[in-house]
Image (cartoon, helix red, strand yellow):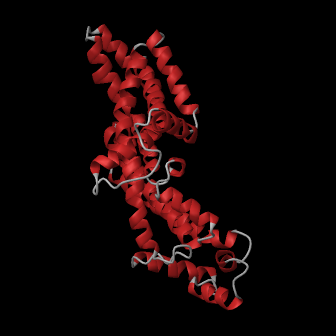
Amino acid sequence: MGIYIVKRILISILIVFLVSIFAKSLIHLLPGDPARMAMGYEAKEEDVEQLRIKMNLDKPITTQYIIWVKGLFRGDMGMSVLYNRPNRDIFAERLPRSIAIGLPALLLSVPFAIFFGIISAIKRGTLIDQIMTFFITLGLGTPVFWLGILGIYVFAIWLKILPIQGFVSPFADFGGYIHKAILPVCCMSVAMVAGVTRQTRTNMLESINQDYVRTARAYGISENKIQFKYALKNALIPVITIIGLQMRVIIGGSLLIERVFNIPGIGSLLVAAINNRDYFVIQDAVLFISLFTVGVNLIVDILYGFIDPRIRLGQKRMV
């Protein structure tokens, strides 16, 4: 097991390194002069040259990368050209807003999705299963931005019970946070619930048809014990990986929801940075989202190793 953990950590470090190279190379991959595009074509050449020096664009790309990485280890993420503020302050301000929307959506989605998946698998072929399958397909195929617009029309404009847009920190006003966050959180939860429900149903059906389940039935073990103690335990192992992949939504996957509900989070920050050629913000945002995603996947892989004995036995054989 120790070799498995070390291997996953080394792979994660390699992925982060490659992503950091890609994030830094974005400035040079895009056509045109980054400093000129950031300041606009009407800016004076002297001002553009000063910005070029400030962004270290006058140095070789390897030197730029080393300076950037050293700054990250010191907590210096550079300055935003668009906001004229340190990127560290901007991310510290925007990140809690994205988490306050994405994390509740994930926490609400997982238990409901697992419950619906179990019921759908147990009731396979019945009317309940058909209804759930229909809503799963509908949830996976519905664009989240359209769902947000529909929610605004129904609950904000027609029924007038929820606000159209905006965000309030839960630490400043928890009641106001609930009032404004309930609609975007629910809109984000739809696709999560549909995806995890489908995966749970599929894995549950596979587990129910395994030989050890037939053996348990032959021994006279109750059906509820077979389904919830034996089949469900093995069915949830792949679901954990799917849930881990869904966690990327907490940081970078709420872009459309933030745009629809005018929530100034990481997603809207990245869009504004791209539109205004704010390259330091772009590269830091790409790296930050990648770090979070790789970190979550690493934790999920390690937990997967603890839960699934086949991985532990496989590592022992390798030793």
**Quarter of the image where one finds residue 304:** top left
Residue drawn at x 47%, y 58% is: 264
Image height of 168 relative to 156, above or below: below
Q: Residue 188 at what x, y percent from top left?
A: 46, 41
Image height of 149 relative to 282, above or below: above
On the question of residue 300 being in view, the answer is no
Pick the front one: 79 or 239: 79
On the question of residue 37 being in view, the answer is yes
Q: Give the mark count.
A: 0
Q: Residue 207 at what x, y percent from top left?
A: 40, 22
Residue drawn at x 50%, y 47% is: 257
Pick the front one: 239 or 7: 239
Residue drawn at x 40%, y 65% is: 93
Q: Residue 76 at what x, y percent from top left?
A: 43, 78
Residue furthest toward the bottom?
Answer: 46
Q: Residue 6 at what x, y percent from top left?
A: 38, 57
Pick the front one: 289 or 212: 289
Pick the front one: 63 or 269: 269
Residue drawn at x 70%, y 68% is: 30
